[in-house]
């Protein structure tokens, strides 16, 4: 990526984050999931998320005082869980 384009993108993100009405920046919307969304996705409580973070069961980081989770990593966890619980609708014939 061109340095000028990268600089423009970074400046736009920083400008948005500096606004007084900051709720979720472009960075949050594109790359991260917050605690509230995690609770909805996995149907768990704050305490469960805390335990997952303590056990390092989910990757997380702290941005601007908020705990966030990388969207790609969470998507991978969901895909893995779905693959593990998939049961074929076709019954196998046993012997």
Image: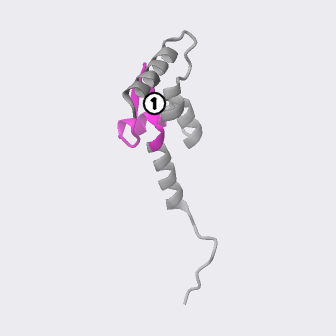
Instruction: Tell me residue 40's x, y (percent).
Output: 59, 37
Instruction: Tell me residue 15's x, y (percent).
Output: 49, 15
Instruction: Tell me residue 68's x, y (percent).
Output: 45, 30
Residue pointed to by mark 1: 68
Q: Residue at x 51, y 30 (%)?
A: 34
Classed neighbour count for the residue bearing mark 1: other residues with Cα under 10 Å, few (<14), some (14–19), many (≥20): many
The residue at the far bottom in this view is 95
Q: Is residue 1 magenta?
A: no
Q: Is residue 52 magenta?
A: yes
Range of the magenta residues? 48-72
The chosen color scheme is: one colour
Q: Residue at x 40, y 35 (%)?
A: 1
Q: Residue at x 54, y 39 (%)?
A: 44
Say which element carries label 1: strand
Q: Where is 85 relative to 10, above or below?
A: below
Q: Is residue 49 visible?
A: yes
């Amino acid at each position: 990526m061109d340095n000028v384009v990268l600089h423009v993108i970074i400046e736009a993100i920083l400008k948005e984050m500096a606004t007084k009405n900051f709720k979720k920046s472009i960075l949050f919307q594109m790359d991260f999931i917050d605690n509230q969304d995690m609770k909805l996705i996995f149907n768990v409580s704050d305490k469960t998320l805390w335990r997952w973070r303590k056990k390092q069961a989910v990757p997380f980081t702290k941005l601007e005082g908020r705990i966030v989770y990388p969207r790609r990593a969470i998507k991978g966890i969901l895909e893995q869980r779905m693959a593990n619980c998939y049961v074929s609708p076709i019954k196998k014939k046993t012997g």
